[in-house]
């Protein structure tokens, strides 16, 4: 039997299932973060016209599934649609990502990892391996640039599992690239995730992201 | 080699095969996934490119529409300027005509009776002289001083010249009124030569040093908006005068009276009127010749030209009269404007 560790959290010396490990920090801690995806919106802009929470029924008045299948084709749709997240625009050029994870041919709806507000402007996205690697670097540089202390001592890196899937044989480069920017002697750990939580911009509220590389730098005062 | 060893080896091989098979399975699964990803991506890119092409075409069509609307607007603006100008000119000329015509009529009307009366006076003086050939010294001296023989010769000529002058003034006023054709709206059958001559009359002062050569053919009356066509002649002739002035200004040793404008008219068997206006001025460089009819294109100094003259001319000829306006030019040699008008519109 093969145990897929990624799906099972480890707490102290135990492997658990259906559990959430929690790690708390306290004290005079310095933190900074960075988030970037490398996913690029490429379709014309559309509006979410009917949505209930995270279930999108209509985009531009058409069933959401039609919108997706019109772009991605029907042939291999089920295997790959999850990669092509929607870029949801907060302002003219600032967006966050919402990845689809289920669809219903009967209602024509597409379900996403998290809520999308009605009347949001969205665009379908695509990603290339170069863009993904560059975004990892951007995420890290952003965290370094905003670090409030002298030098961080620990870096926590969270990368979306979809990034690894697209990077394929280049996967190891993501970490190698990031390491070149980190001070030597800095402790570093991380994991692949199915949703990342971070502020989209500095000092804005945290929110859930898809397809991103999140850097958290920690250090003492 | 014992059986034990063999079975160990076989077990290891079987294990290796199992591992390799799993790797192969995983690899094939991944390959399948990559193929699906590529197929999906291909479809996405194709559709996005298609959408971009469509939106590009839409944009091009929109930009064409905008361009058309802009041109239409510019033309409407030209028409407005044109009619504004003509109406201003018309009002001015009708005012001038009214103010000048009356006093000039008194003068002109009195000239002939005045000449007759003066003749009578001279006859009377001659009679006196015949019957009293030896007048007192004072009269004799006065006769000497005023040179009575010269006055008798000169006064009729002075009156003649005054009559010519008043006639000229009347002609100019008439030309001005005819030129603007105030009160005349729409198409009428007119003599184009009259229009050209009226225009020349108005430009007379500007053209004082330019020789005008006319080769007028036999023309039927042409149905046209006469005031508008006069505007065309005016704009072309004005440019011709300027082109000649520019050429003379550029000459190291200016030749006075070397400027020439020749006007040729012809009625062609295909019921077309051809009017050619040629100057021997500075000419238009080939890189500008395509632009001369563009609205707001001008080579004149700021404030001197609006860049609308030829644009208006072309619009009047082409749109109002279904004719054509062509330009041919050689630098330093001159420019020809060729107007073709169909007899019927």
Image (tube, coloured by chain):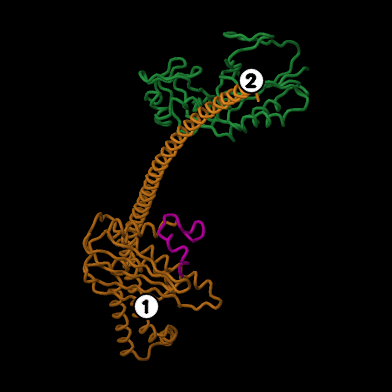
Q: Is residue A82 magenta?
A: no
Which residue does the numbered mark 2 point to in the structure image? B4
Residue B208 placement: quadrant: bottom left
Q: Position of residue B318 (x, y in %)?
A: 31, 58
Q: Is residue A13 visible?
A: yes
Tell me if residue B8 comes above or below residue A73 in the rendering.
above
Task: Report which colour depicts chain A.
Answer: green
Task: Report which colour depicts chain B.
Answer: orange
- Relative placement, left or right, of A102 versus B214 is right
Judging from the image, mark 2 belongs to the subunit labelled B
Tell me if residue B254 comes above or below residue B73 in the rendering.
below
Which residue does the numbered mark 1 point to in the structure image? B158
**Which label's residue is closer to the chain start, 1 or 2?**
2
Q: Is residue B106 visible?
A: no
Q: Position of residue B128 (x, y in %)?
A: 32, 86
- Boundaries of the magenta span: B283-306
Residue drawn at (72%, 19%), measured in percent from left and top?
A218
């Amino acid at each position: 039997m093969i145990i897929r560790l990624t799906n099972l959290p480890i707490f102290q010396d135990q492997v658990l299932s259906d559990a959430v490990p929690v790690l708390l920090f306290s004290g005079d801690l310095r933190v900074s973060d960075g988030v970037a995806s490398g996913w690029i919106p490429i379709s014309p802009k559309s509006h979410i016209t009917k949505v209930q929470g995270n279930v999108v029924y209509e985009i531009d008045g058409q069933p959401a599934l039609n919108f997706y299948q019109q772009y991605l084709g029907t042939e291999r749709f089920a295997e790959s649609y999850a990669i092509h997240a929607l870029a949801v625009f907060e302002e003219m050029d600032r967006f966050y990502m919402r990845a689809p994870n289920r669809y219903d041919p009967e209602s024509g709806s597409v379900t996403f990892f998290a809520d999308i507000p009605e009347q949001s402007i969205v665009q379908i996205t695509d990603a290339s391996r170069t863009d993904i690697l560059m975004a990892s670097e951007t995420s890290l540089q952003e965290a370094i640039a905003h670090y409030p202390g002298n030098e961080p001592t620990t870096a926590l890196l969270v990368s979306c599992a979809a990034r690894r899937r697209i990077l394929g044989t280049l996967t190891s480069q993501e970490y190698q690239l990031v390491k070149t920017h980190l001070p030597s002697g800095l402790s570093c750990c991380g994991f692949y995730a199915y949703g990342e939580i971070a502020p989209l911009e500095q000092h804005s509220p945290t929110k859930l992201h898809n397809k991103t590389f999140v850097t958290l730098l920690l250090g003492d005062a | 080699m014992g059986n034990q060893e063999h079975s160990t080896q076989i077990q290891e091989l079987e294990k290796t095969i199992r591992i390799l098979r799993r790797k192969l399975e995983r690899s094939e699964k991944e390959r399948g996934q990559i193929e699906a990803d590529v197929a999906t991506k291909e479809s996405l890119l194709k559709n996005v490119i298609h959408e971009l092409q469509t939106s590009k075409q839409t944009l091009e069509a929109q930009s064409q529409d905008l361009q058309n609307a802009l041109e239409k607007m510019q033309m409407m603006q030209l028409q407005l300027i044109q009619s504004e100008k003509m109406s201003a000119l018309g009002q001015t000329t009708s005012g001038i005509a009214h103010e000048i015509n009356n006093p000039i009529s008194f003068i002109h009307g009195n000239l002939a009776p005045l000449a007759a009366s003066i003749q009578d006076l001279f006859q009377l003086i001659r009679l006196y002289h015949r019957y009293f050939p030896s007048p007192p010294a004072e009269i004799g001296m006065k006769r000497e001083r005023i040179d009575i023989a010269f006055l008798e010769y000169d006064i009729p000529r002075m009156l003649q010249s005054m009559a010519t002058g008043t006639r000229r003034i009347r002609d100019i006023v008439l030309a001005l009124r005819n030129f603007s054709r105030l009160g005349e709206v729409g198409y009428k059958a007119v003599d184009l030569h009259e229009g050209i001559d009226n225009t020349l009359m108005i430009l007379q002062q500007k053209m004082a040093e330019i020789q005008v050569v006319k080769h007028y053919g036999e023309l039927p009356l042409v149905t046209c908006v006469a005031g508008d066509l006069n505007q065309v002649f005016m704009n072309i002739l004005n440019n011709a005068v300027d082109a000649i002035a520019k050429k003379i200004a550029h000459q190291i040793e200016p030749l006075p009276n070397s400027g020439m404008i020749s006007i040729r008219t012809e009625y062609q068997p295909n019921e077309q009127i051809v009017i050619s206006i040629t100057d021997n001025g500075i000419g238009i460089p080939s890189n500008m010749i395509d632009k001369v009819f563009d609205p707001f294109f001008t080579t004149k100094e700021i404030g001197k030209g609006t860049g609308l003259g030829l644009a208006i001319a072309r619009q009047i000829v082409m749109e109002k009269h279904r004719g054509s306006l062509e330009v041919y030019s050689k630098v330093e040699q001159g420019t020809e404007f060729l107007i073709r008008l169909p007899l019927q519109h």
